[in-house]
Image (tube, grey):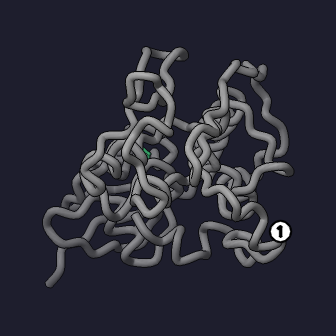
Amino acid sequence: MSKTFTMDEREIPFVEGQTVMQAALADGVYVPHLCAHPEFKPHGSCRVCTVKVNGRHAASCTLAAREGLVVENQTAELRELRRELVQLLFVEGNHFCPSCEKSGDCKLQALGYELEVKTLHFTQLFPDRPVDASHPDLMLDFNRCILCELCVRASAEVDGRHVFALSGRGIDKHLIVNSESGRLADTSIAATDTAVSVCPVGVILKKGRGFRVPIGQRTYDAAPISAMPEGKKP
Ligand code: FES
């Protein structure tokens, strides 16, 4: 008999080594998430995957599944908490969805729709972030970065290039490029790198492909993120 825990009164089977999120997603239960990715170790930075376990908040992407856990996932309280986290991510950057090439394919935007974010609620910070268009094939728009570190992890662990890193602390934390000049053109990054394709928002974009897929025909135009295979992956 497989081991199980309870999520919103449903028995979720798991195998040893799975996290609560992995087990739930594998069983077809959507748990919102941004910084988790099936190819990388859980990171636990965005906290959008927060659930309540035996009455206490925990990040489901880093919490090991255990027999007998009682997990709350889709409650009004958690939905509100996740909505606030997404609102904070929106106000900490500069996200202008209607003009963004990633609109319709962006996980932050998709999660905004999923959680019915209708206003930003918090005061927008409008940080001054430059755009790096120095590379012939790629451009970086730091305004959209949510600090998930997926590009950092992908470039280091898969591509073996260490092109990206985070610098600074707290509200000053930001994505940087590892080259003496700080410009992307002076790194060894290639357009085929995993780091380029793994960005969940619109920071790393390929040049010469803008709006090749029309708005209305993109990933999350077809169905909300909770119903997409993409949303069902940890
Ligand atoms: Fe769990 Fe980001 S902290 S998905």
Residue drawn at (17%, 80%) of the image: 2
* Label 1 within 8 A of ligand 1 by Cβ: no
The image shows residue 170, relative to residue 215, as above or below, that is: above
Q: Is residue 96 left or right of residue 133?
A: right
Q: Amino acid at mark 1?
A: Ile
Farthest residue toward the bottom?
A: 1
The image quadrant where one finds the C terminus is bottom left
Do we see residue 81 in this rendering? no
Q: Is residue 86 left or right of residue 186?
A: right
- Residue 69 horizontal/vertical position (percent): 27, 56
Q: Secondary structure at mark 1?
A: loop
Number of marks in the image? 1
Q: Is residue 148 left or right of residue 108?
A: left
Q: Relative to the observer, which residue lies in front, 199 or 29?
A: 199
The image shows residue 64, relative to residue 163, as above or below, that is: below
Residue drawn at (47%, 25%) of the image: 182
Q: Quadrant of residue 59?
A: top left
Q: Relative to the observer, which residue lies in front, 19 or 101?
A: 101
For label 1, the crowd category at 10 Å Cα-Cα, with few meaning under 14, some 14 to 19 and many 20 or more, is some
Residue drawn at (80%, 41%) of the image: 96
Residue at the disc numbered 1:
215
Residue drawn at (51%, 67%) of the image: 30
The image shows residue 12, relative to residue 184, as above or below, that is: below
- Residue 158 horizontal/vertical position (percent): 27, 57
The image quadrant where one finds the N terminus is bottom left
Do we see residue 79 in this rendering? yes
- Residue 221 horizontal/vertical position (percent): 76, 72
- Residue 7 horizontal/vertical position (percent): 41, 63
Q: Relative to the observer, which residue lies in front, 84 or 67?
A: 84
